Image (spheres, rainbow, N blue to C red):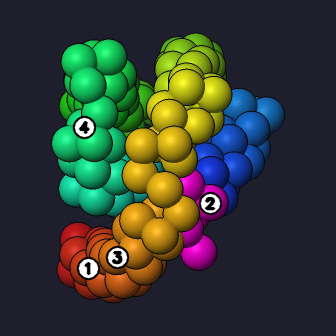
Amino acid sequence: MNAIDLLKADHEKVKTILGQLSESTERATKKRVELLDKLEMEISIHTKLEEEILYPAFKQAGTKEEDVMYFEAKEEHRTVDSLVLPDLKETDPGTPEFAGRVKVVKELLEHHIEEEETEMFPKAKKLLGKAKLDELGEQMEMMKSSFKKEWAASHMAA
């Protein structure tokens, strides 16, 4: 699977989890916690794949315009990973505050996904070409498998 197809498949998974999370009720605290854990895993692994494989290749192949896209995308990742998701995890899943924070996370991620899929990914296809994207996709699949094992091991121990 090429890099873009793999990342788009991840985007669909994240959007599905976000949809389920935003439709959940205050009474479904266990379900909310499970979905939040799943969301955190998907986002963490996806972010690593983008930041360690696709983004550097995109930035290297591009010009100043691509540099701006690169840094904006990284900043959006930082906002979700360092600020919004940790706040959500600290919020009682049985409260209206949790629902409000889920809505913000959903809006931020949907905005980020849309920008990547309509702006960055088409440019990456032109700049990198099919062969390079296939190669990056292979690297991502191996890295993703390794990260999922690490994630499972670290969360079993916790």
Q: Name the amino acid, label 3.
A: Gln
Ranked by sequence position, the earlier of labels 1 and 4 is 4
Q: Are marks 4 and 3 in contact (CB under 8 Å)?
A: no
Q: Is residue 3 magenta?
A: yes
Q: Where does the image place residue 97, in percent across and percent down from the top left? A: 52, 16
User: In the current view of this chain or complex, which residue is farthest to the right?
Assistant: 23
Task: Residue type at mark 4: give it.
Answer: Lys
The correct choice, above or below, for 13 with respect to 106 in the image is below
Q: Nearer the viewer, mark 2 or mark 4?
A: 4
- The residue depicted at 36 percent of the width and 83 percent of the height is 142
Q: First in sequence, mark 3 or 2: give its number.
A: 2
Q: Quadrant of the C terminus?
A: bottom left
Could you tell me if residue 156 is visible in this image? no
Q: Which mark is residue 5?
A: 2
Q: Is residue 124 left or right of residue 78?
A: right
Is residue 5 inside the magenta stretch? Answer: yes
- Distance from the alpha carbon under mark 3 to that under mark 2: 13 Å
Q: Which mark is residue 59?
A: 4
27 to 68, vertically: above or below: below
**Which is more N-terminal, label 3 or label 1?**
3
Choose between 126 and 117: the one closer to the eye.
126
Give the residues in magenta.
1-6
Pair 4/3: label in front: 4
Marker disc for residue 139: 3
Q: Secondary structure at mark 2?
A: helix
Point out the frontmost of discs 2 and 1.
2
| Spot occupied by residue 12 in the image (x, y as percentages of width and height) | 69, 50
- Disc 4 and disc 3: Cα gap in Å? 17 Å
Label 2 environment density (alpha carbons within 10 Å; few <14, some 14–19, many ≥20): some
Q: Residues within 10 Å of mark 3 (few under 14, many from 20)?
A: some
Question: Height in image: 68 above or below 135?
Answer: above
